[in-house]
C-alpha cells in the first residue's frame, strides 16, 4: 500500500467530494431478505445496438435460475463506454427481452440500473481506495502509454501498467497537485499488490476452482475522459451493492476472473458465484467444423433475426433452454413438463464448451411448439407478427381474421394428427398464400385432365359432407378410367397451384364454393 490521499485531494482528483462512505452504501443497499438458496442474477448488456444470441441465452439462464430459486433477476445497462454507444440501443435490448417474454425486476431500492447513473457509487468506492492507498491517480497520457507499450513489446515483456512501468504508482501529494494545477485529469488506477509468481485460486460454479497467476496490473478503475468506471470496477461495485449472488457471463471474461477475485478480496467482500458460459457455436457449412456464431457471417447470431422472421420466441427459448439444460427435451417429450419454465435447471449441467445451435434443430422445436398451439393462439401470433414485421402482402393476409382462422385451423382438429409444417409466422403465411386470390398463382405447367375438372364442376356442391364429396370423386375416376388420387391431384393443383397440400376437402370448405368454381373455371 501507498500513503493515502487527503479528503481535499480526493475531491480534486475525482472532481467532487464523494457522496457516501462505504458503510453508508452498505446500509443503503442492504443484503437482500430472501429465502436460503435464492439466486440473485442479472443480465448486463452493453448497449451496442446489437443483441447477440449468446446474450439471450445468458438472459434466459439468469431469469430461469432466479425464478426457480425464488430469487431476483435484474437488467443492468452497462453504458460506461460512451464512445461505443448507439442511439436506441437500450430500447432494442428492452424490446427484445419483452418480446421473448423475459421479465426482470427493477426494484428502485437496488437501482439505478444504468451504470451511467451510478457515478456517485463508483466515486464513493474509489474515494475509499484513494483514502487508504489502494488506488492512486495516474497522469500517464495516451502517448506515455503507447511508449510504455512499445518499450515492453521490444523487450518481450508483458504489456500494461504494472510495477516499474507504473510511473505514478507512488506519486506524491505535491506531484498530484502540480498535475492538477496544470489542468490534467487523472485516471484512477488500482495499486496492485499481486505478483504473477504467486497463484490465486478462483471459483467458477461449473468449472470448479481454477488457479491463475496473480494480477499485478494497476488497472484503470475510473476513466479520465468521462469519470465513468471500467467494466472491472463497475462489476465489483454493482454486483456487490446489487447483492448479486450469481454472475453468469460469457467465457471471454474468464481471463479477468483473477483480477475480479482480487478486487473482491481487497474489499473484504464475498465474491459472487461465477458461471462462465460457452460461446454459442454452429457447424460451418463449408468446412464442416464447429465454430462460434459470427456476427458477420450468420444472420442467426442476431436476436433481431428471429423476431423479424417470425420464429416463435418460446421455441427459440425452448431450444436455448435445452442447450443450457440438456435434460429438458426428454422431460418435455415425456410430458413431464410443459415448458422450459417448469423444468428445473442444474447449475452444474450448463455446458462449458461446444454449445451447438443448429437451425435444423430449431426448426424441430418450432414445429413441435406450433403444433401444440391452439388455433386462436396461432392466429394471434401470426397477426401480431404480420402487423409489426410483415410486408403489404402479409398484412393483407391477416386483415380478415375469420378467414385466416379458418385457413390455419385446417388439420388441427385431430390431436393425434396435427400438421407439423409450420415453422415461423412468416413461413406459415407463405404456405397459405394460395388461399388469397391476390396472391394465388395458377399452375399453368401442370397437365390437367380437363374432362375430369369439367365433370367435377357439374356435380359439385359445397354443402356435401366429406363422404358424399369423396364418392363423387370416385365416380369421376371410374368414368374416365383414372385413379381416385389422379382426380384429387387435378383438383388440388387447380385450387392451390401445388401438388402437396393439406386435406383437400378442408381446403375447399375454407375457400368456399364460389372460389372453388371460379378457379377451376378459369383453368378450363
Ligand atoms: N457488459 C458485459 C458484456 O457485455 C457484461 C458481462 C457480465 O455479465 O458481467 O459482456
Image: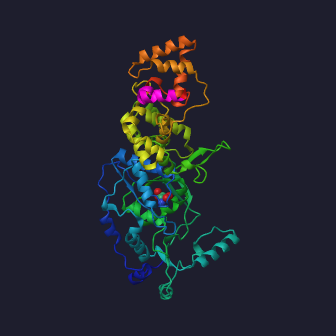
Main secondary structure type of the part rendered in magenta: helix
User: Which of 234/385 is in front?
Assistant: 385
Residue at 44% across / 80% down in the picture?
A: 13
Residue at 57% across / 53% down in the picture?
A: 295
Question: How many numbered callouts?
Answer: 0
Q: In which quarter of the image is residue 29?
A: bottom left
The percent coordinates of residue 165 (x first, y second) are 60, 75
Tell me, yes or no, whether the highlighted magenta stretch contains residue 172: no
User: Which of 519/37 is in front?
Assistant: 519
Q: In which quarter of the image is residue 43?
A: bottom left
User: Which of 295/351 is in front?
Assistant: 295
The percent coordinates of residue 408 (x first, y second) are 42, 33
User: Which of 23/388 is in front?
Assistant: 388
Residue at 46% across / 13% down in the picture?
A: 471
Q: Give the range drawn in magenta.
A: 507-522
- Is 447 above or below relative to 164? above
Q: In which quarter of the image is residue 514?
A: top left
Amino acid at each position: 500500500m501507498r500513503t493515502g490521499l487527503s479528503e481535499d485531494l480526493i475531491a480534486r482528483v475525482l472532481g467532487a467530494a464523494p457522496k457516501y462512505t462505504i458503510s453508508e452504501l452498505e446500509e443503503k443497499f442492504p443484503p437482500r431478505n430472501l429465502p436460503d438458496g435464492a439466486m440473485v442474477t442479472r443480465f448486463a448488456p452493453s448497449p451496442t445496438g446489437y443483441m447477440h444470441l449468446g446474450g439471450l441465452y445468458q438472459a434466459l439462464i439468469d431469469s430461469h435460475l432466479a425464478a426457480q430459486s425464488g430469487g431476483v433477476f435484474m437488467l443492468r445497462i452497462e453504458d460506461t463506454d460512451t464512445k461505443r454507444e448507439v442511439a436506441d440501443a437500450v430500447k432494442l435490448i428492452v424490446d427484445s427481452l419483452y418480446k421473448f417474454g423475459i421479465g426482470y425486476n427493477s426494484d428502485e431500492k437496488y437501482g439505478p440500473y444504468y451504470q451511467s447513473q451510478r457515478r456517485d457509487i463508483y466515486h464513493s468506492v474509489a474515494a475509499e481506495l484513494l483514502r487508504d492507498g489502494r488506488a492512486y491517480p495516474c497522469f500517464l497520457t495516451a502517448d506515455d502509454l503507447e511508449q510504455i507499450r512499445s518499450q515492453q513489446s521490444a523487450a518481450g515483456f508483458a504489456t500494461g501498467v504494472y510495477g516499474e512501468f507504473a510511473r505514478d504508482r507512488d506519486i506524491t501529494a505535491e506531484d498530484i497537485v502540480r498535475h492538477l494545477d496544470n489542468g490534467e485529469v487523472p485516471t484512477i488506477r488500482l495499486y496492485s499488490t499481486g505478483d504473477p509468481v504467486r497463484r490465486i485460486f478462483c471459483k467458477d460454479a461449473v468449472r470448479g476452482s481454477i488457479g491463475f497467476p496473480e494480477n499485478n496490473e494497476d488497472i484503470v478503475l475510473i476513466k479520465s475522459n468521462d469519470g465513468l468506471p471500467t467494466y472491472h470496477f463497475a462489476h465489483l461495485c454493482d454486483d456487490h451493492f446489487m447483492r448479486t449472488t450469481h454472475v453468469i457471463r460469457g467465457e471471454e471474461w474468464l481471463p479477468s476472473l483473477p483480477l475480479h477475485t482480487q478486487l473482491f478480496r481487497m474489499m473484504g467482500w464475498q465474491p459472487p458465484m461465477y458461471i462462465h458460459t460457452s460461446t454459442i457455436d454452429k457447424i460451418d457449412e463449408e468446412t464442416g467444423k464447429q465454430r462460434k456464431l459470427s456476427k458477420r457471417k450468420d444472420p442467426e447470431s442476431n436476436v433481431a433475426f428471429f423476431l423479424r422472421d417470425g420464429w416463435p420466441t418460446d421455441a427459440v427459448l425452448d431450444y436455448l433452454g435445452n442447450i443450457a439444460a440438456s435434460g429438458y427435451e426428454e422431460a418435455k417429450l415425456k410430458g413431464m413438463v410443459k415448458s422450459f419454465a417448469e423444468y428445473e435447471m442444474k447449475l452444474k449441467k450448463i455446458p462449458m464448451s461446444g454449445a451447438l445451435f443448429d437451425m435444423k434443430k430449431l426448426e424441430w422445436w418450432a414445429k413441435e411448439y406450433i403444433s401444440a398451439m391452439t388455433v386462436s393462439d396461432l392466429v394471434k401470433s401470426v397477426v401480431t407478427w404480420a402487423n409489426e414485421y410483415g410486408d403489404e402482402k402479409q398484412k393483407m393476409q391477416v386483415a380478415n381474421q375469420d378467414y385466416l382462422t379458418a385457413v390455419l385451423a385446417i388439420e388441427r382438429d385431430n390431436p393425434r394428427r396435427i400438421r407439423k409444417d409450420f415453422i415461423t409466422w412468416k413461413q406459415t403465411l407463405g404456405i397459405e398464400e394460395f388461399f388469397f386470390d391476390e396472391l394465388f398463382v395458377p399452375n399453368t405447367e401442370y397437365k390437367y385432365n380437363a374432362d375430369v375438372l369439367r365433370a367435377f364442376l357439374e356435380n359439385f356442391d359445397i354443402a356435401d359432407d366429406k363422404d358424399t364429396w369423396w364418392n363423387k370423386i370416385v365416380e369421376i375416376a371410374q368414368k374416365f378410367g383414372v385413379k381416385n388420387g389422379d382426380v384429387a391431384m387435378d383438383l388440388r393443383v387447380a385450387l392451390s397451384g401445388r401438388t402437396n397440400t393439406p386435406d383437400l376437402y378442408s381446403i375447399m370448405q375454407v375457400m368456399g364454393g364460389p372460389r372453388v368454381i371460379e378457379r377451376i373455371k378459369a383453368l378450363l
